[in-house]
Image: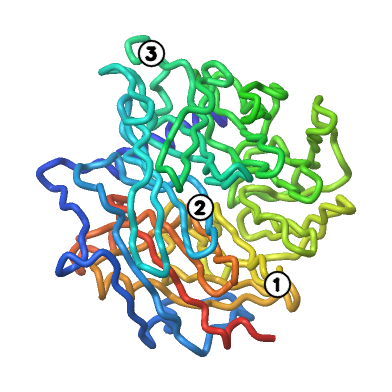
Amino acid sequence: MFFRAFVSGAFLLLSLGSLDAQDFKPPALPGGKMVDSGTSPQLLKPISKLKPGTKIAKTAPVVDFAFYPGQTYPGRPWSVWGDSLAVGDLYYSSIGDHLSPEGNAYVYQYDSTKKTLKRIVDVRKTLNRPKGYYTPGKIHSRIDLGSDGWLYFSTHRGSTRVAFNPDFHYEGDWILRHHPQTGKTEIVAAQPLKMQSLPTGMLDPDRLIWYAGTQDGLNKAGPKFLAYDVRKRKVLYSDDKGPYRYLIFARSTGRVYFNGTQSSPNRTGEPDKLVRFDPEKPGKPVEIDARVGLRSATLETPQNIVYSVNGDNLWAFNTKTEKAEYLGPCVVGTKTYITSIDADMKTGRYLYFVAGAHGGSQDDGTPLVQYDVKTKTRKVIAFLHPYLYDRYGYVALGTFGSAVSPEGDKVYITWNGNYGTKREDLGRRLRFNACAMCVVHIPESERQP
């Protein structure tokens, strides 16, 4: 049942996101600008009813905004599906055209000091496949920086049926890496598990192990688990039962945790128990006595806590004791689908997210939420709709990729969005047609007790 729903949902997305070439308009800022910055009291004005107890920031943030370069042809649709990374003053993110069988995906670097956004990886160029062969239209994993100085990520198919046609030569997907200093991009592993795409993935930066949850190319089986040693270029361990969309990674111990249940924003009932994989003792993951929902999760905070979310439910998982605590609801409006949640790693106190990842966030005003784990309170830092539309003609519909700066003073967000729709048509269901990025500068006064 899950696989039929997954496939039909993907085709629904494609039908909503498809755009004829004659109707396509490449997104651009006025005057040829690459990045524009602004602020307004409008960022603090809700457009719909909020849940009781929701706070609103008192100081409007400065917001930097840019369209991703290279969106010069229609995607099906242009979209973001992978989580992002902030390192120093740099932000790394990915988007893809979702085309199939010959799709393409890209990685970008944004310099928040210079305010420059540039493409650093072209997946199709890196793979250099023959004409007509499958090339991935999505990067669905995290982007992570290894201790060796390389950025790692993995690819995912644009169509769920690409493996059904032998003419496309689908054999599986790739783990890739890019070196920001030299500009070199290379293949780490081609089809590390045969006939499996790699939608879920993250790196242990110290031990240089890439962890992945796979998707069966023929949609006949559930996700597999993969632990791949990128230094030795070999599979450390694989298992037939893996994570659907995210893992918990404890950098302090090197252990990873996941559950094998499909996450859903509307799921009710207790989540499954977590299983643990320890790279020091590679073998079948062991069940532990802790339950969390796991559609997305933060990195491990200085307090050795990983926060996970599934719908309007938030958990704290202690990586030292392996105990979980349910923190309760976290969203502020009607949308509950959260696929990227980030912690302020300097203090470990504040979490940031935008609900409505697959679209619809604008119905709640596209709120960027700050969750205070000390007081268990929710605060909207900014309502980005209709601010972005009024200023740039862009509706931020949702995100799968965000990150918080190491200092905790900036939240970077890569958007699934709509560009160029007339104001009188904003009430209809909007399709993805362009990706954009913004940086929300969190006022210091909104990061105080």
Amino acid type, callout 1: Thr
Q: Is residue 319 left or right of residue 427?
A: right
Q: Which residue is mark 1?
A: 347
Q: Kindly state the secondary structure of the residue where label 3 is placed.
A: loop
The answer to whether any part of residue 219 appears in the image is: no
In the picture, residue 74 is in which quadrant? top left
Picture residue at 82% right of the left edge, 52% below the top? 319
Amino acid type, callout 2: Ser
Image marks 1 and 2: residues in contact by CB distance under 8 Å: no
Q: Pick whichever, 252 or 225, lies toward us.
A: 252
Q: CA distance from mark 1 to mark 2?
A: 20 Å
Query: Which of marks 2 and 1 precedes in the sequence?
Result: 2
Q: In the image, residue 262 lies at what x, y percent?
A: 63, 39
Q: Pick whichever, 406 or 443, lies toward us.
A: 406
Query: Which of marks 3 and 2 precedes in the sequence?
Result: 2
Q: Badge 3 local density, few (<14 within 10 Å), some, or many (20+)?
A: some
Q: Which residue is mark 2?
A: 84
Q: Which mark is residue 169?
A: 3
Q: Is residue 60 left or right of residue 298?
A: left
Q: In the image, residue 173 lies at what x, y percent?
A: 48, 25
Residue 346, compared with residue 241, is above or below; it is below
Q: Pick whichever, 224 or 260, lies toward us.
A: 224
Q: Is residue 260 left or right of residue 51?
A: right
Q: In the image, residue 83 lies at what x, y percent?
A: 52, 49
Point out the frontmost of discs 3 and 1.
Answer: 1
Outermost residue on the left side: it is 22
